[in-house]
Amino acid sequence: MSPPTSGKSKESGTARILGSGASGVAELLVFHPVDTVAKRLMSNKAKVSFSALSPIIFRDYATASLPKKLMSLFPGLGYAAGYKVSQRIYKFGGQPWFNEIITRHYKDDFTRVFGERKGKMMMQATAGSLTGIGEVVLLPLDALKIKRQVNPEAFRGRGALRIFMEEGTTLYRGWGWTMARNAPGSFALFGASAVTKEYALGVTDYSKATWTQNFIASIAGAVASITIAAPLDTVKTRIQNANFEQKVPGLTVVRDLIRNEGPSAFFKGLTPKILVVGPKLVFSYTLAQSLIPFFGKYV
């Protein structure tokens, strides 16, 4: 939800939390299985063929009935819920906050360098990038979600609290690669969305964009974001899905990936993500922009 260029907030913090949180819950229920498929494809180090897809995606349930196969795509749902809802609250509620700060203190600088129109879009993108970098605080929940999806053996029957106590800072493994992925990814998400609204759809006040306009702009932003962040996302996933006691340097992952699988492996799992960009943004970004002003009427 983009604030007006004056830097003053139209919605309360509570409205942003409720709206973005609800969008995260809805997104989780629909897209967690797709995310599981993408993560398992990215973590697979063997050559992928059509006949090998079922064991890669469904693992021990490859020969099970269809209902059991589908349920197998919901591992780590508790961790996923904690991560996804927290992430959406932070991202969709935090980006406008960063944008307000930038607008309030640096609007003249952006306008002088980029011009008024492009400066507004650059402020949106920069606010998105700062928000993305800050997402690193949620890394432990993301790491637990990924391990549950692709390496459940790493838990060895331990609960979340025990893992947090025993593993400590190892849950922040890959934090540098996460920040490196999030900074350009979030810049592209909010930046491309703003460019689409401004140039393709003729929207000057982003907060007044219609549902359809938000939907179209969100698709453009998400496709740009996912594509740009894909290589670093693959590296981050490989680092995080290793066993807790196994420390794998990012550069080692990059070297082994290029040597054993080729450069195209950086984009493993990209197609499933791209294919769900439209619906995903309907349930997350677009939904958040609709619900935040709705809750803003009451809180």
Image (spheres, grey):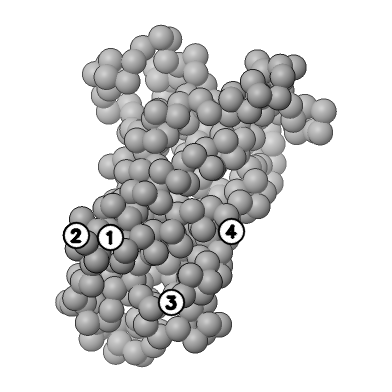
The secondary structure type at the circle numbered 2 is: loop
The secondary structure type at the circle numbered 3 is: loop
Q: Quadrant of the C terminus?
A: bottom left
Question: For mark 2, what is the residue?
Answer: 299
Q: Is residue 213 above or below residue 271?
A: below
The answer to whether residue 66 is left or right of residue 245 is: right
Q: Amino acid at mark 3?
A: Ala
Label 1 crowd (10 A; few <14 / some 14-19 / many >=20): some
Tell me which label, 4 or 2, sits earlier in the chain. Answer: 4
Calculate the distance from the C-alpha at mark 1 to the C-alpha at mark 2. 6 Å
The secondary structure type at the circle numbered 1 is: helix
Check residue 278 in the rendering and tell me which mark sits there, or answer none. 4
Calculate the distance from the C-alpha at mark 1 to the C-alpha at mark 3. 17 Å
Q: Position of residue 293 (x, y in %)?
A: 31, 66
Mark 2 and mark 3 residues within 8 Å of each other at the beta carbon: no
Question: For mark 3, what is the residue?
Answer: 209
Calculate the distance from the C-alpha at mark 2 to the C-alpha at mark 3. 22 Å
* Mark 4 vs mark 2: in front: 2
Question: For mark 1, what is the residue?
Answer: 295
Q: Is residue 101 above or below residue 145?
A: below
Q: Amino acid at mark 4?
A: Gly
Q: Amino acid at mark 2?
A: Val
* Mark 1 vs mark 3: in front: 1
Label 4 crowd (10 A; few <14 / some 14-19 / many >=20): some
Calculate the distance from the C-alpha at mark 3 to the C-alpha at mark 4. 17 Å
Check residue 94 in the rendering and tell me which mark sits there, or answer none. none
Label 3 crowd (10 A; few <14 / some 14-19 / many >=20): many
Tell me which label, 1 or 3, sits earlier in the chain. Answer: 3
Mark 1 and mark 2 residues within 8 Å of each other at the beta carbon: yes
Q: Amino acid at mark 1?
A: Phe
- In this view of the protein, can residue 33 be seen by the observer? yes
Q: Position of residue 12 (x, y in %)?
A: 19, 63
